[in-house]
Image (cartoon, coloured by chain):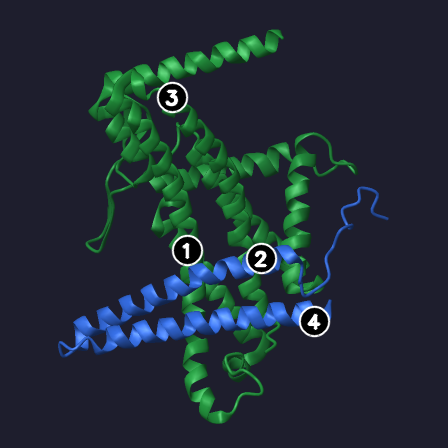
Chain colours: A blue, B green
């Protein structure tokens, strides 16, 4: 028997508490900007190595980061919508 | 009443001490400030006191020149060992005193972060890892708020190291749980037409790199920015002399806010790590 109460307060899995949903949405803004920055930077490095002076990889990385950022926001909004419907 | 007046005196003593140091030191204070946030080969525990680290070379390829943040990481490790081995009393059925305070954090990480994102069985299994991550980051952040030490979590190499651990953990957990084919299947959303998958698969795959990258930048940027704001506000005293002394109260306010940020950043890093690992473990589209 757990006399200290250490086994109390265990949350259900998966966690869909409002706090976690908020953090999820807050991280979307960071992810959006950083995805564009990281992919553009990687593209720039590829251009430095194999590029022909037309910044093909940099632009490719930029649009891939942009696409991932929007996709990430879309997924998070969808998840929030479905958790709201369940409530 | 006596306590209040005593703390008031201590507060003014500290204020006068700080302002005297800032006025008298000039370049030394500048060095001290820079040394607090940037990795260096010297440790300035206090203004005018500097300890130089020896340069160690491992063959031709690797030399160990800047030892400040490495020392901070090592000190954080020693403090954590002291806290959890010497001060944490596990024998009592009811936690008391300092053990009680630590148990609040331990149970919070286990229940709210580990079990709620990884499930009951896996959550308990991975709790020690997330507890280590949480307390290590918290210790680094708090050490950064003490003038004696430096902020190792404001170094991008340190946060990159932590994020790399999470990145490899995501891959390893995915491979072990689902096998190589199942691992790549996690990047294929269900119910999507095949032509769209050609676009979505690379986008999903890119997320594997971006998520840990966002994790490392978030911690690094928040810790660095907080400290730079405090030092910038204190810099007003150097620029405007005694007229700038009221900025000390603003710096104090930001400092108190930074204590909150130290806890929040440790929580966010651990929570998002658990979420990413949990996603790879129990992936559902």
Chain holding disc 4: A
**Of the residues tagged 1 and 3, which is closer to the observer?**
3
Q: Which residue is mark 3?
A: B246
Which residue of the protein is positioned furthest toward the bottom in this rendering?
A: B194
Residue B84: image tag? none
Q: Position of residue A25 (x, y in %)?
A: 53, 61
Near mark 4 (Cα within 10 A), the count class, few <14, some 14-19 or many ≥20, is: few
For the residue pair A67 and B105, the one nearer the viewer reads as A67
**Of the residues tagged 1 and 2, which is closer to the observer?**
2
Residue A28 seen from this side: yes
Spatial distance from mark 2 to mark 3, Cα to Cα? Answer: 36 Å
Q: Residue at x 54, y 38 (%)?
A: B81
How many numbered marks, from 0 up? 4
User: What is the secondary structure assignment of the residue under circle 1?
Assistant: helix
**Of the residues tagged 1 and 4, which is closer to the observer?**
4
Does label 4 lie on the same chain as label 3? Answer: no
Near mark 3 (Cα within 10 A), the count class, few <14, some 14-19 or many ≥20, is: few
Spatial distance from mark 1 to mark 3, Cα to Cα? Answer: 35 Å
Spatial distance from mark 1 to mark 2, Cα to Cα? Answer: 20 Å
Chain holding disc 1: B
Question: In the picture, which quadrant includes the N terminus of chain B?
Answer: top right
Spatial distance from mark 3 to mark 4, Cα to Cα? Answer: 52 Å
Chain holding disc 3: B
Q: Which residue is mark 1?
A: B216
Residue A85: image tag? 4
Q: Which residue is mark 2?
A: A22
Spatial distance from mark 1 to mark 4, Cα to Cα? Answer: 34 Å
For the residue pair B76 and B13, the one nearer the viewer reads as B13
Give the mark, 1 or 3, whose residue is nearer the N terminus.
1
Q: Is residue A46 above or below residue B159?
A: below
Question: In the picture, which quadrant includes the C terminus of chain B?
Answer: bottom right
Chain holding disc 2: A
């Amino acid at each position: 028997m757990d006399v200290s109460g250490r086994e109390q307060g265990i949350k259900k899995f998966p966690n869909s508490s409002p706090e976690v949903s908020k953090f999820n949405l807050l991280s979307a803004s960071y992810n959006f900007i950083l995805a564009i920055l990281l992919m553009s930077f990687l593209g720039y490095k590829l251009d430095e190595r194999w590029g022909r002076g037309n910044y093909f990889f940099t632009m490719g990385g930029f649009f891939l980061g942009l696409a991932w950022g929007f996709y990430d926001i879309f997924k998070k909004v969808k998840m929030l919508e479905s958790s709201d419907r369940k409530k | 009443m006596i306590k209040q007046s005593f703390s008031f005196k201590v507060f003014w003593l500290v204020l006068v001490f700080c302002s005297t140091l800032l006025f008298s030191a000039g370049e030394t204070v500048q060095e001290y400030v820079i040394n607090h946030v940037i990795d260096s080969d010297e440790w300035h525990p206090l203004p005018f006191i500097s300890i130089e680290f020896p340069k160690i070379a491992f063959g031709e390829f690797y030399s160990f020149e800047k030892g400040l943040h490495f020392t901070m990481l090592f000190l954080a490790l020693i403090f954590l060992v002291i806290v959890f081995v010497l001060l944490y009393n596990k024998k009592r059925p009811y936690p008391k005193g300092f053990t009680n305070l630590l148990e609040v954090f331990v149970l919070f990480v286990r229940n709210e972060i580990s079990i709620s994102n990884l499930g009951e069985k896996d959550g308990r299994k991975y709790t020690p890892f997330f507890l280590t991550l949480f307390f290590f980051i918290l210790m680094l952040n708090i050490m950064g708020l003490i003038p004696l030490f430096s902020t190792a979590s404001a170094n991008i190499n340190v946060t990159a190291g932590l994020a790399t651990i999470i990145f490899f953990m995501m891959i390893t957990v995915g491979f072990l749980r689902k096998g190589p084919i199942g691992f790549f299947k996690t990047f294929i959303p269900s119910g999507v037409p095949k032509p769209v998958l050609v676009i979505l698969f690379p986008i999903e795959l890119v997320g594997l790199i971006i998520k840990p990258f966002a994790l490392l930048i978030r911690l690094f940027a928040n810790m660095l920015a907080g400290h730079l704001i405090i030092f910038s506000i204190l810099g007003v005293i150097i620029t405007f002399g005694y007229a700038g002394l009221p900025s000390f109260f603003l710096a104090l306010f930001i400092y108190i806010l930074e204590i909150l940020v130290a806890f929040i950043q440790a929580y966010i890093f651990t929570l998002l790590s658990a979420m990413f690992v949990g996603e790879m473990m129990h992936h559902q589209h």
